[in-house]
Image (tube, rainbow, N blue to C red):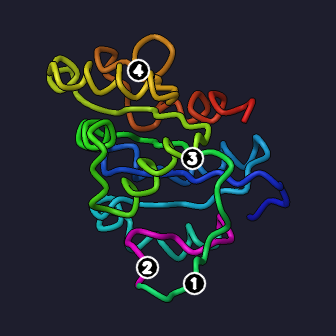
Amino acid sequence: MTTTANRILYLVCCAAAPAVRVADGVRAAQDAGWDVCLILTPYAHRWLEADVPALRELTGHPVRHEYKLPGQPDVLPPPDAILVAPATFNTLNKWAAGISDTLALGLVTEAIGLGLPMAALPHLGAAQAAHPALSRSVDFLRAAGVTVLLGEDGYDPGRGDRVETYPWERGVAALAGA
């Protein structure tokens, strides 16, 4: 199902357990009026490769996971906002460090410079959440204008959420004013 919304949301999906239900995230965004373009990290693409045709049909757009070649046209409209969900420990730390070695990271690092509205809804284990690099990265991203939904207002690593209850709607709601 595609939407006729004018607002374009890039949903950047990383390889964490909720990725297997990214269609739920797409539908949550579509229900909120977004026209959704799906960007997968390389590992998320590997996990979801068999689902890509259905995801392409659901969004009405190609599902991207790698940089285009020089001279190739952009196949997606430019975003009005970006949601990174599920956001992994790796992606949050690379994003904060300005590393853009994948299409997903290239888009989110560039979006900070463009001032696009962005939200990140993490999914990571309690041990990773306790690593000092995460708090530094989250603080940096928040200071750069990214809404990072970690803790009571988003994903709580201590709750032991199941994939079926991953709060996609909270990530979408964080961009309601975009």
Residue displayed at 43% across by 79% down: 68
Which residue, given by chain and number where applicable, does mark 4 sit on?
150
Query: Who comes first in sequence, dot 1 or dot 3?
Result: 1
Q: Amino acid at mark 4?
A: Leu
Instruction: Provide residue 177's location: percent of width, then percent of height.
Output: 75, 30
Towards the viewer: 172 or 20: 172
Query: Who comes first in sequence, dot 2 or dot 1?
Result: 2
Query: Who comes first in sequence, dot 4 or dot 3?
Result: 3
Q: Secondary structure at mark 4?
A: loop
Discs 4, 1 touching: Cβ within 8 Å? no
Discs 1, 3 touching: Cβ within 8 Å? no
Which residue, given by chain and number where applicable, does mark 1 sit on?
73
Residue range corresponding to the magenta coloring: 58-69
Q: State the separation of the CA atoms marked 2 and 3.
A: 20 Å
Q: State the separation of the CA atoms marked 4 and 3.
A: 24 Å
Which residue, given by chain and number where applicable, does mark 3 sit on?
114
Discs 2, 3 touching: Cβ within 8 Å? no
Q: Which of pointers 1 and 3 indicates the residue nearer the eye?
A: 3
Q: Secondary structure at mark 3?
A: helix
